[in-house]
Image (cartoon, rainbow, N blue to C red):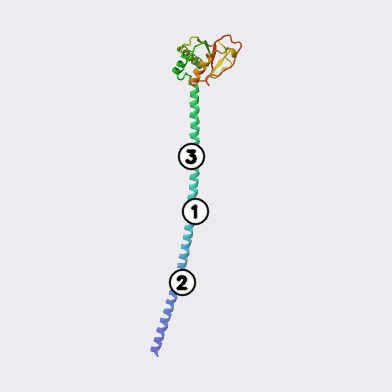
Amino acid sequence: MSDLSELQNKSDILSRSVDRWNAIYIGALVFALIAGALTLLATQQLISRGKKLSAVNADISREKETESSERASKLEKEVADARTMQAEAEKALLELQEKMRPRHLPERDKFVSFLREYKSGPLEIRYSGNDVESRNFATEIEKAFKDAGWNGVHLNNNVLIFPQPVGLMFRFKSADSIPEYAGAVQKAFELIGMPIRRGETDPSEQTGALILIVGAKP
C-alpha cells in the first residue's frame, strides 16, 4: 500500500506541475495576444499619423509653392513696371535732348539747289532777339539763301514779335501783296521737311518784301 500511496503522490505532484505550466503557457499566450493587439494598434496609429503628417506636409508644400508663385508674379510685375518707367524716362530724356538741340537745315545742299532754279526776290527774315537758338537758325537760313543766289535776303531783329510764334511762319502786308516767289520758298522748306505756316496779314507792314518769321523751336 505504501508503494501505491507513493505513486499516487507522485501523480498528484506531476498533475499540479502540469496545471501550473498550463496556466503559465495560457498566461503567456494571452500576454502575447494582448501585446500583439497593442502592437497592431500602435502600428495602425503610427500609419494613420504618418498619413496625416504626409497630408499636412503636402499642404505646407502647396502653400509654399503658391506663396512662391505669388511672390514670383509680384516680382515679375515690379520688374516689368520698373522697365516701363525706365523706358518712359529714357524717352522723356531723348525728347528733352531733342528739344534742346539747336535746329539746322537738313539736306542743305538739296535746299540750296532747289532755290537756284527759281527767280529770287526780297526776303526779310525776322526772329526774336532774346532767342539765341532762333537767331542762329535764322542766320543759317539767310546764308543758305545767299548761297543759292538770293541776294535780296536780310535779317531783321528790330521788330517786336509778341507772342513769339513756334516754328516757321510767313507774314504779309495783305493777301494781294503775296509775291510770286513765296511759293518757291515754301516748297524749298517743304522739300527738307520743314513746312511754313501761312501766318497772318498785317496792313501796318511797311516793307513789300516777303517776311519769314523764325519762331521758337517746336
Label number found at residue 30: 2
Q: Position of residue 180 (x, y in %)?
A: 54, 13
Q: Work out how far the residue at label 2 is from the one at label 3, CA to CA, in angstroms.
A: 67 Å
Label number found at residue 158: none
- Type of the residue with mark 3: Glu
Q: Is residue 6 above or below residue 147?
A: below
Between disc 3 and disc 1, the foreground one is: 3
Between disc 2 and disc 3, the foreground one is: 3
**Is disc 3 placed on a helix, strand or loop?**
helix
Disc with the residue nearer the chain's start (1 vs 2)? 2
Between disc 1 and disc 2, the foreground one is: 1
- Residue at the disc numbered 1: 56
Q: Work out how far the residue at label 1 is from the one at label 2, CA to CA, in angstroms.
A: 38 Å
Residue at 49% of width from left, 29% of height from top? 91
Q: Position of residue 2 (x, y in %)?
A: 39, 89
Q: Is residue 207 above or below residue 29?
A: above
Q: Position of residue 106 (x, y in %)?
A: 46, 20
**Is disc 1 placed on a helix, strand or loop?**
helix
- Residue at the disc numbered 3: 76
Q: Residue furthest bottom?
A: 1
Q: Work out how far the residue at label 3 is from the one at label 1, CA to CA, in angstroms.
A: 30 Å
How would you rate the neighbour count of disc 3 (Cα within 10 Å): few for under 14, some for 14-19, many for 20 or more?
few
Disc with the residue nearer the chain's start (2 vs 3)? 2
Disc with the residue nearer the chain's start (3 vs 1)? 1
How would you rate the neighbour count of disc 1 (Cα within 10 Å): few for under 14, some for 14-19, many for 20 or more?
few
Using the image as rendered, state which of residue 208 and residue 155 is in the foreground. Answer: 208
- Type of the residue with mark 2: Val
